[in-house]
Amino acid sequence: MNRTWRFFMGSDQKWRWQVLAFDQTVLEESAGRYKQYETCMANAAEHGYHFSPSLSTRPAQDPLRKQRKSYKFSKRPDKESQSSRGTAKPAAAEAKALTEVS
């Protein structure tokens, strides 16, 4: 028989559980009302409830897995600020200077 467990909070702000049949007929329900959800689940476990997480849930990340390093590069100054200081070189001259040095 296919059974579905339903946990809900009633109008009195207390947790309850029910076991439903495939046609949504209530087969069994909690006798008490519970202030905490965990207490309600514990009582349901005494009546046969077994927690099984959804298969669609993404698994937790492995804590031993190395985190990717994030590199931050300094921003290159724009050409206007260089030319105002008189230090800007044309790209061809800069490339030529680099080839002469190497």
Image: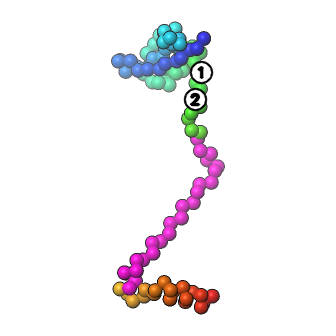
Which numbered tag is attached to residue 34? none
Farthest residue in the right direction?
64
Question: In the image, is 19 to the left or to the right of 85?
Answer: right
Image coordinates of residue 100 in percent, x first then y, are 59, 91
Q: Residue at x 42, y 88 (%)?
A: 87
Placement of the N terminus among the 4 image quadrants: top right
Does 34 appear above or below 90?
above
Q: Residue at x 47, y 24 (%)?
A: 37
Image coordinates of residue 59 in percent, x first then y, are 59, 39
Q: Which residue is mark 1?
A: 50
Does 59 appear above or below 12?
below
Please give the range of residues in magenta: 60-83
Q: Amino acid at mark 1?
A: His
- Name the element at disc 1: loop
Q: Residue at x 50, y 86 (%)?
A: 92
Q: Which residue is mark 2?
A: 53
Farthest residue in the bottom direction?
100
Quarter where residue 78 is shown: bottom left
How dense is the environment of label 1, judged by Cα within 10 Å: few (below 14), some, or many (20 and up)?
few
Q: CA distance from mark 2 to mark 1?
A: 10 Å
Of labels 2 and 1, the one closer to you: 2
Q: Which of the two residues, 79 or 65, is positioned nearer the viewer here?
A: 79
Image coordinates of residue 68 in percent, x first then y, are 58, 57
Does 55 appear above or below 79?
above
Q: Amino acid at mark 2?
A: Pro
